[in-house]
Image (cartoon, grey):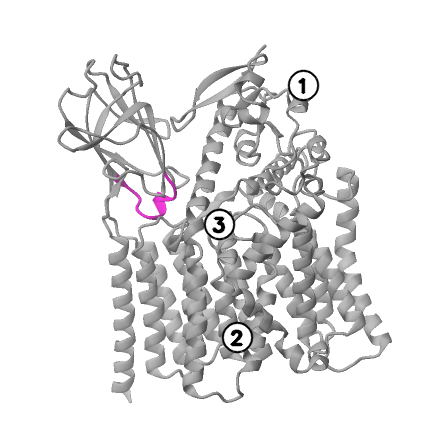
Amino acid sequence: MFRRFFAIGALLLLVILISLGLVGLARLRVDRIDLGLRNQQMTDSVFHAGFYQREFTPNGEAYRWTSSSVVIQLRNKANLIPAYLLKMRLRSHPAGAEPFSILSDGQVLATSIPDQRFRTYYVLAQPTVDGELRLNLRTTTFVSAQDLRPLGLFVTDLTLRPIPQIDWLTLIVVALGLSLLAGLLIVQSTPIHSVVVTLMLAGFGLALVASGDRPPTLPFAVLSGSFLLVTILLVSFVRPTLVRLGLISIALTVTFSGILWPTWLTDDAFISFRYAQNLVEGHGLVYNVGERVEGYTNFLWTMIAAGVLAVGGDLVVWSYLSGIELGLAIMVLSYIMASRLYGPYWGLAATLLVATSQSLLLYTARGAGLETGFFALLVLAASGTYLLSQIRRSWLIATGLLLAAAAMTRPEGILVCGLTVGHLLILGPTPTPTNVRTRLASGAWLLGTFLLIFLPYFLWRWNYYGDLLPNTFYAKTGGGWSQILRGLTYAGSFAITLGGPLLLLIFWPWWKDWRTALHSWRSYLLLLALTYTAYIIAVGGDHFRGERFFVPVLPWLVLLLVDGIASLTPPQPKRIYAILVALAFGLGGTLALLRTTPIDKTISGMDQTVWIWREIGWWMADHSEPSATIAAQGAGAIAYYSQRSVIDLFGLTEKHIARMSLPTMGQGVAGHEKHDPVYVLQERRPTYIPQIWESYFGGPAGLRDQYRLITITTRSGREMQLWERLP
């Protein structure tokens, strides 16, 4: 017996050590990062400015001329490798040698005078405290008779080589997590081969994602810990081994989706962060100090952000971390609900469809920074507790609390609450009919709990802002049939991601026996899914990629869809049939993940834009008076980082523009249709207007009488142009 236990322990220890070795080797990669001289374009994880287009010498060697200031920014590089060696091969321009400097976040790392011949320079660079590697190459330019461009340095090679270091914290977290997982499996009397396979999947899976070259948004130890904790949780309550392994694989994909695909933060997230910032600083829940405009629709999410700021947290880091945790929570809750409704294997199938939806991943584990995932989790949990109230009526109180939290996170929570109360009063959550008095009493418990929380909040915001509806409602709606047609296109795009015509299988149980379906959980989830979809169509959808408005609807639709597929399956299908169904779901999940490929460039571009606008905000904070104002079409990052008043050119946080009437409303980009340049120039009179948005005012001709064009240099060395109001 002792020998057997010793052999088992040695085997498990070997598996854990191999896993640690693979993770450690993956984290010691020394891949060179080519910063764009050998390739036509720089990599998608590098933000850059100040290089001219690639050219070639007569012998075919590629090179680039620099301007006076070159900026290179690499997001989250501290989470990949803590130190880098910058290699530059360059020479001076023909007019003579001028000194150049390499700076990191404004601090000079090195200064040198280049030769007329090529020399190679090496500089040690480390990411800043926020995890970003920001480098700036500055020099004096010249202009020749043959080339009127201001030219700086002649560069033929510019690369970053990570300096490998052992990531001890990650190894400790992985070792501890795998050991706890092994111990739990042994306590459960799991067969040894299942223990080994589970550990190998978790450990080797971590090694695989660690070998990726995209920098994670959070330290790898944090990501590994999150994944292993969820794995331990799943092993605790999921019994079939195949289902366990499937859920662990899905959890790995969700946790590390920010390494598998590009991550991003939306500028709109920073609008809420700006409200939170002003609240913490004592100015009230406002966007601009002294202006009470409700330019957000996510009160509870904004209050959580304010809490993070109040304790000294970083909202960018919090956005990424909360997104991952929300994605995992929605995945786990989807499995719990699905397995209760139709068993663990079909529950795994439903979880696969939910967690591989790029709509969900884009607005949770891959970033975004919006309240979408939080709201989706709340309404999914509320629908689950409502269905549980057929067992114990006290679950109705939990449902009311969750719906109140949802309504304070997104206004659509009121819709979900109304539908839930309506379903309760007409049918009730139980499969057996109940009398009217019982349903009325249950409805009173649910609605009373909801109003106890939501009504005081609603009365406060009505008194504080003076409007029944948020300002964003007026800015985004009013398009009539054009808006509805845009919403139909939006809904159609999302439907394709779930199989298009296959969604009709949702109605198969109703075709078989509509009475049974009506008095089951199907009627409730179908009511939620269809009504919420109609609402999305009515408001015209959204302008963000990935159909974010459908993220809360996604789990409901998947639960109904898998139920329809399961009802077509024989009670005891043959093994070949089960294998084919499993392969079909696996293929569907893979195709859903690959759907991101055509939109990744857009996502990366939107993310890069946010950090460019941050640069403008930083310049405002460093060089403008506290009373200065700036007009912006991207009203989030500029406001948050500048801490100055911002005139939102699309009206999300500006009452006058939001309440305009447009004959073409609903035909353009949702939320970006209303504008009034005359009002902005004559009434709001912004101190600065970024040149990138001069077309809003009719181009330079519309600004020259009141503004002058100036060139600014931001903290990172990026040169940009602003229109500055004349005295």
- Number of residues whose C-alpha sits closer than 10 Å to that of mark 3, classed few (under 14), some (14–19) or many (20 or more): many
Looking at the image, is mark 2 or mark 1 earlier in the sequence?
A: 2
Quarter of the view holding residue 596: bottom left
Q: Nearer the viewer, residue 283 or 648?
A: 648
CA gap, disc 3 and disc 1: 38 Å
Tell me where residue 257 appears, x and y as whole percent.
42, 56
The boundaries of the magenta stretch are 74-84
Q: Position of residue 31 (x, y in %)?
A: 23, 48
Q: Position of residue 648 (x, y in %)?
A: 62, 31
Q: Which mark is residue 347?
A: 2
Q: Is residue 244 magenta?
A: no
The disc at residue 367 is: 3
Dot in front, 2 or 1: 1
Name the residue at 42% across, 79% down. 580
Nearer the camera: disc 3 or disc 1: 1
- Which residue position holds label 1? 682
